Image: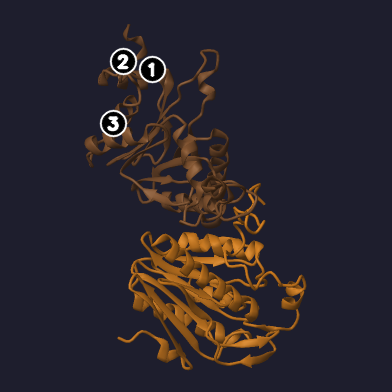
Amino acid sequence: MSRFTDPLTGADAVGDPTAPELRDGFDGADANAQARDEESVNKTGTTTVGIATGEGVVVATDMRASLGGRFVSNKSVQKVEQVHPTGVLTLVGSVGGAQSFIRTLRSEADLYEVRKGEPMSLHGLATLAGNFARGGPFFAINPILAGVDEAGSHVYSIDPAGGVMADDYTVTGSGMQLAYGTIEGAYDREMSMADARDLAVRAVEAASERDTGSGNGVYVAEVTDEGVDIEGFDDTDAALAER
Amino acid sequence: MQDQNQQAYDRGMTIFSPDGRLYQVEYAREAIKRGTASVGVRTADGVVLAADRQVRSRLIEQESIEKLHRIDDHIAVASAGHVADARQLVDFAREQAQVNRLRYDEPIGVESLAKEVTDYIQRYTQSGGVRPFGVALAIGGVDPDGTPKLFETDPSGTPYEWQATAIGGNRETLMGFLEDEYRPGRDLDSGIGLALETLAESDEDGEIDSEAVEVTVVDTETHRVRSLDADEIESHLAELELGGESDE
């Protein structure tokens, strides 16, 4: 809290840097939200992969939602969504928390852009996402933020406690070890977008084979400075780059 | 009768007069004119802020008259008008600059900061039981992308962007001088010269005492606020023949 109050509303005039600017709708968020999220709600289990290249980033996600990884509650979930003109976020963890997180981040990025006349940098967006994960009403999420800005291609993992880590490639979700095994050694920063796309799809495919929380196809997002392109495939082979 | 009518729109909170004026805001502008002048000049490689800090008594510690304030690494503010009001806005601006860093891990843009401050000022023209801020600020700095920017805040809460501006007493005279003399593409040194020459217009003899002026610059190379020390100011004054203290 700052020492400045808004003379009109009596509210803090400086604002909480960890809270969304658009707070309406969260004011009523009850204290049990976290507890609810930890019970048997829809979770994504999930394998989500983000790979950065010189030209852009590729994100691939599986399509399964499950209850505790034991029952497949949905077989066609889109777990990667656009949140920025050249940025995407994956949906990992509690479905409710992740969807709410995506909506909030998207509106914050839009608001920033109209107010300041230029899109938010990916670093700024990642910092904001980390703040929200740490201090906001979003629980049990572990997404990847990936995108392109003036500084280049970026992949960030955001952990439930608000940790933000940039990397050349990153994987989150229950199938992460399997996907990492596929990418490790095969990644090259200079690789083409088509090669990165194949690698990301293969990584999700490997996790889908043996992780019970992942499967049922793959969504692929390609982000370049031109924008975002997202497409879903029931058959992983169909998701590979066209050559 | 006329006087009584006017008084009704004149007291307490800011409300419109029948002809659409906000007297309290206009009075706040009068308060600014009572202060000594501050000048802002934008150049190709940075922004210059200069302020007159003449004092009424030789016993006061001149250093204690603060009219230029650092807001963040890359933004400074010059004030004119009520010092106490200026201090509130300066601290509000400092907090907003830090909020931007906490929120986005990025330095705040000069325009964004100016608008945060003017939005805050505006609320004091639309609330009961408060009075508007009797101060104008010249907000100068370098954006994260390296663009120098200069803004002015007004008691109504309107932000203005300038190439060069003067706030405070003698504003019309100083603005007239700036309008004649300002050229885009000056370098920082020449911008400091213009700012000092403009301040000298306030003086009857066209002279400045180096002790009675503050100069702060933000350059596009370092993106850092830097206050000129007395020796630097004196050498600028000597070069401009504006009568540095050591002349006689």
Q: Residue at x 56, y 45 (%)?
A: B92
In the structure shown, which secondary structural element does the residue marked by tag 2 occupy? loop
Q: Considering depth in this image, is B145 or B19 the residue closer to the camera?
A: B19
Instruction: Tell me: residue B163, above or below residue A163.
Output: above
Provide residue B199's location: percent of width, then percent of height: 35, 28
Look at the image and give the colour of chain A. orange
Q: Which residue is mark 1?
A: B209
Q: Which residue is mark 2?
A: B243
Q: CA distance from mark 1 to mark 2?
A: 7 Å
Q: Quadrant of residue A138?
A: bottom right
Residue B236 has which mark? none
* Lower sequence index among marks 1 and 3: 3
Q: Which residue is mark 3?
A: B194
Q: Residue at x 29, y 28 (%)?
A: B193
Q: CA distance from mark 1 to mark 3?
A: 16 Å
Q: Residue at x 31, y 15 (%)?
A: B243
Q: Are marks 1 and 2 in contact (CB under 8 Å)?
A: yes
**Residue A218 visible (yes or no):** yes
* Residue type for callout 1: Asp
Q: Chain of mark 2?
A: B
Q: Residue furthest top?
A: B248
- Crowding at dot 2, Cα within 10 Å, few <14 / some 14-19 / many 20+, comes out as some
Q: Considering depth in this image, is B199 or A85 the residue closer to the camera?
A: B199
Instruction: Tell me: residue A164, above or below residue A225.
Output: above
**Residue B73 visible (yes or no):** no
Quarter of the image for the C terminus of chain A: give it. Answer: bottom left
- Crowding at dot 3, Cα within 10 Å, few <14 / some 14-19 / many 20+, comes out as many
* Residue type for callout 2: Gly
| Chain letter, colour brown | B
